[in-house]
Amino acid sequence: MTNVGIIGLGLMGGSLSIALQERSNTYRFVGLDHNETHQQQALELGLVHEIVHTLDEISKCDIIILTIPVEGIIAISQQLHDLDEKCTVIDLGSTKAKISSSIPESIRTHFVTAHPMTGTEKFGPKAAIPKLYENKVVVLCDMEKSGTHQQEVAKKLFSEIGMKLVYMGAEEHDRHAAFISHMPHALSYSLANSVMRQEDASSIVALAGGGFRDMSRIAKSSPHMWEDIFRQNRANLIEAIESFEVELKKCRHMVENGEWEALNKWMSEANTLHDIL
Amino acid sequence: MTNVGIIGLGLMGGSLSIALQERSNTYRFVGLDHNETHQQQALELGLVHEIVHTLDEISKCDIIILTIPVEGIIAISQQLHDLDEKCTVIDLGSTKAKISSSIPESIRTHFVTAHPMTGTEKFGPKAAIPKLYENKVVVLCDMEKSGTHQQEVAKKLFSEIGMKLVYMGAEEHDRHAAFISHMPHALSYSLANSVMRQEDASSIVALAGGGFRDMSRIAKSSPHMWEDIFRQNRANLIEAIESFEVELKKCRHMVENGEWEALNKWMSEANTLHDIL
């Protein structure tokens, strides 16, 4: 039996538990969360078999999954000690450079710092779904800093739930994530607010088709979680927003000046995304 | 038997034909399109029973559907004449004010000017799908300018394919459509281009999760079609882009200045979209 401790009982940890339980009956799940409602829900939904209340209890697990905001991951990494030689700690934080460099040297080889490129706009244990990780990418960062055993455990675990493994330095990850995930969230929040501020917002929203629904979906994401991500990846996020602003300004300029041929060309360039996605 | 003429054999006209054929066998479809490949594909896919080559032939139909760019709709409206008293012309153009005011007075009552708030990023007859219109909104504009018979025909047709009918003035429609559809397309094109311009674009895109996929989907839309829409709805589009820019600038400012509490509040305001969508 492999004991898996999950710190942070929400969408990510809960979905991981469901996915692993569907594939194997050799895992036993122990949960730690300061939110009592989430503790209760996680037990009722069968996401964990037991709730514990101290880090000491959870640090006896074979695998420890950290699915809490980045600051929390860093704080907990300072408090973990006396880990068994084979213990593997995997954090799923959305930014990686600060985590990777903050883990105490004494336990650095125990850590695998990973970012599954998946999620929904929902959160909490009730948001957990079986296929959240299937066919999605997980970025494994600074793997050379993890122990050989810990690398194998993490690769096996993510492969088992159907993920595609990508290896990258933590700094490079953070820049990429700003463009592919964090900046798009800033756009979606901005889009939602720009519509909601209109006097006739509800009659505008009544006309929403698939395009608007898709583009505003992630504007429903947790402010608590995204405030933390924006804070952690501030410089990269601003760079990505600036790149976006350059393009939107071009678009507005072409429309204002009736440069239709140039606009058409610019739209065709955007179409090329189709070739790689 | 009701003869339906479709001018412009693509996603919208093709999907309409499939939806009507699924619900009733009393319709016969005649198509007109200058693209010979599309003529052939529409016949092969059973979207139309016959291809004609002149407006005179198609104007004998009971219902004429115009699913071509706005400029084309206006041009054709100048050439239609000798319509039967019961003939109903329905245009599906994405902007409505210019169309509504350009239709010659002599045939204005024949026209119903409608905008189904649906679509995909794909185009051409092969893109046609059965459920494109189901449970979606269609905006019927300036209906007081249409004849009583024509109003009834249009309402019956859109209801038959499962659409929700919304009535609105053409000017109001165009402003609403700028916020809910046209500006989001400008954002999606800008997002795609801002990522594609990065040196390591393909390694960034390799990390794409659901959020980026959803937000960049409509960046794959036809430049030909969207150049026309941006051109037709220029002033409203610019106003909507400006409203968006105000919000994105706020977001950037809060991140740059570490105003996390204000950022959290701003994100929570965006979350309220959830209450009405």
Image (cartoon, coloured by chain):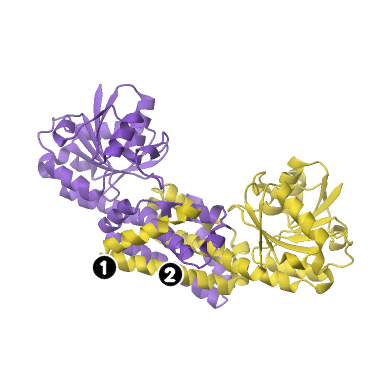
Chain colours: A yellow, B purple
Residue A161 relative to residue A220: left or right: right
Residue A226: give x, y in percent of width and height. Answer: 59, 64
* Residue named by callout 2: A245
Viewer-closest of A216 and B219? B219
Q: Quadrant of the N terminus of chain B?
A: top left
Residue A249: give x, y in percent of width and height. Answer: 37, 69
Disc tally is: 2
Q: CA distance from mark 1 to mark 2?
A: 18 Å
Residue occupying the point 12% across, 42% down: B79
Q: Chain of mark 2?
A: A
Pointers 1 and 2 in contact (CB under 8 A)?
Answer: no
Residue type at mark 2: give it.
Glu
Residue A258: give x, y in percent of width and height. Answer: 25, 64
Q: Is residue B183 visible?
A: no
* Residue named by callout 1: A257
Residue A191 relative to residue B114: left or right: right
Residue occupying the point 21% across, 37% down: B89
The answer to which quarter of the image holds residue A201 is bottom left
